[in-house]
Amino acid sequence: MNNPLLQTIEALAKEKGIESDTIILAIEDAVLTASRKYYKDTGENLKTRFNPETAQVDLFATKHIVSEVTNPDTEISLKDAQELYGDEAEVDMEIEFPKRTDVLGRIAAQTAKQVIFQKVREAERENVFSEFSDRTGEVINGIVKRFENGDQIVEVGRTESVLPRKEQSRAESYAPGERLRAVIKEVNHNTKGPQVILSRTDPA
């Protein structure tokens, strides 16, 4: 992986604990979202595909080969298709026509960043849920990070979990940076994503 973008993708995937393919898919979606805004008046069917050789996202307008064209933005006649691709072209096949991405501009780049960030965050959340959802009742080790309204925020691996006030032992007190053992009481899905709830009062 000598390409800087590919190195960045691999580093980000490692840091976030998600697959490189998830980030590449997010980049494809981001460019597609930006492209649809720029080319919104063309009526074309757009698609993107990451090119690992160039580390660029290629953009295409796709057209279906039909016997009779009713929408020239999304369809191409069999005759025209065969002039381009020879006898291999058949009705119902799809043809890709390259489109420029260098014209998308700064706003498109901002849109792309937002989409990538959102997709990566969603993937992180799903990883947290899948990692902890079947570990209810397990005793784990964690590090106290900070306090929020009486609750302790505890780092378990790379995940921040919550030790609510009602699940804390009144005979104990912890300071940020201290280690503790707790039971994974439950894993909830809320608007901010999965939340791992810990307990120090559970019999375990």
Image (tube, helix red, strand yellow):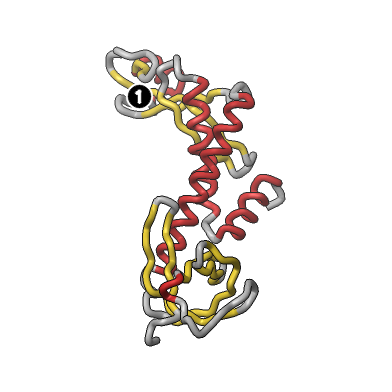
**Residue 88 x, y percent position in the rendering:** 39, 28
The residue that disc 1 covers is 64
Task: Name the outermost residue toward the front.
Answer: 170
Determine whether the residue tagged by mark 1 lies in a helix, strand or loop.
Answer: strand
Residue shown at the point (48%, 31%) measured from the top left: 33
**Residue 165 x, y percent position in the rendering:** 45, 71
Residue toward you, 18 or 89:
18
Residue shown at the point (39%, 82%) measured from the top left: 202
Apparent side of residue 14 relative to residue 165 in the rendered image (left or right) = right
Within 10 Å of disc 1 (Cα), the crowding (few <14, some 14-19, many 20+) is many
Residue shown at the point (63%, 26%) measured from the top left: 106
Quadrant of the rendered image containing residue 62? top left
Vertical comparison of 51 with 108: above or below: below
Apparent side of residue 48 relative to residue 93 in the rendered image (left or right) = right
Apparent side of residue 136 relative to residue 34 in the rendered image (left or right) = left
**Residue 122 x, y percent position in the rendering:** 46, 50
* Quadrant for the C terminus in the image: bottom left
Vertical comparison of 36 with 54: above or below: above
Q: Amino acid at mark 1?
A: His
Residue toward you, 185 or 135:
185
**Residue 16 x, y percent position in the rendering:** 57, 58
Residue toward you, 31 or 108:
108
Apparent side of residue 5 relative to residue 41 in the rendered image (left or right) = right
Residue shown at the point (52%, 36%) measured from the top left: 30
Vertical comparison of 117 with 76: above or below: below
